[in-house]
Image (cartoon, rainbow, N blue to C red):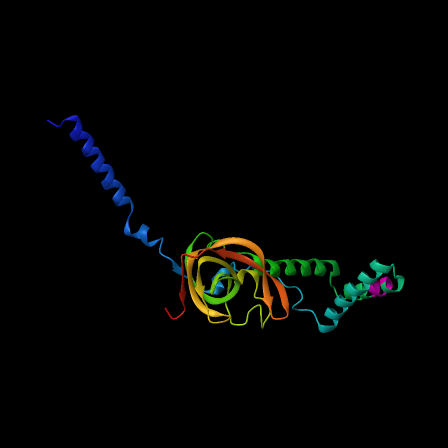
Amino acid sequence: MINEGDSSMTMFARFVLIFSLAVSPGHVQATEPQEISWDTLAPPATVIENPFENLTDDQMDSLRQILRFEARAERSDDAEARAEAQALRKQLAEDGLDVDGLFAARLAIMEEREAAATEVNEDLVGMSVRLPGYVLPLEFKGRKVVEFLLVPTVGACIHTPPPPANQIVHVVYPEGIEVSGLFTPVWITGTMVAQSSVQTVGYVDGQAPVSVSYSMQPLLVEDYSS
């Protein structure tokens, strides 16, 4: 006969067994950091129709002139500039072009390019990753860097213009790392976070704001040769 105590122990043993089976090797592996490259930080490209590809150089120049003339007419109520713009519009209409439609497409393309430079890849957000890059120091504690921007290329933000915001990671690492000047190559391991910010990068002769789309408080920062 099984007494009440034995029954309770049997139920507990079954619970432990079921729980251990649920935590399968595949589940454990899913938490392992995934090594990624910089191109995966940008969201998948959206294909947008570009109506300007088939325009002639003269037609493109006319569109630019219309923008200039109409801006001048709006600023100073310039009748001559307004007349020039209307004449160019008429000429392009005779070519079968919808000027207002082209200007609307221009704005859509500009917005799409801006989004492509700033939006994050949602598939990476919350994922444990391992990413290589170069350290651009923001803050030191003693001789160690405790806050920095991880950038994909040497010279980024200093000797060359900043990369797109979604090609920079703001890293806070209280443990700190020792660096040998600017752009020390490292591997960082941690969880990707979508966090827009503007960080101030110092130069010899001043400073400048840099837009960033990602942040990370890494579990590990290693020398790139590791």
Whole-percent x, y for residue 41 in the image: 49, 60
Who is closer to the viewer here, 62 or 148?
Answer: 148
- Residue farthest to the front? 142
Left or right side of 6 for 103: right
Left or right side of 202 for 21: left
Q: Number of labelled discs?
A: 0
- Residue 102 can be seen, yes or no: yes
Name the quadrant of the C terminus.
bottom left
Left or right side of 208 for 189: left
Q: Within the magenta stretch, is there residue 86?
A: yes
Whole-percent x, y for residue 53 in the image: 65, 68
Q: Quadrant of residue 4?
A: top left
The residue at the point 16 percent across, 30 percent down is: 6
- Residue 94 can be seen, yes or no: no
Magenta stretch, main secondary structure, is helix
Who is closer to the viewer here, 90 or 28?
Answer: 28
- Residue farthest to the left? 1
The residue at the point 46 percent across, 71 percent down is: 180
Whole-percent x, y for residue 170 in the image: 51, 59
Whole-percent x, y for residue 182 in the image: 51, 70
Q: Within the magenta stretch, is there residue 179?
A: no
Q: Quadrant of residue 1?
A: top left
* Magenta-drawn segment: 82-87
Who is closer to the viewer here, 63 or 91?
Answer: 63
Who is closer to the viewer here, 27 or 185?
Answer: 185
The residue at the point 79 percent across, 65 percent down is: 68
Q: Against 35, is 182 above or below? A: below
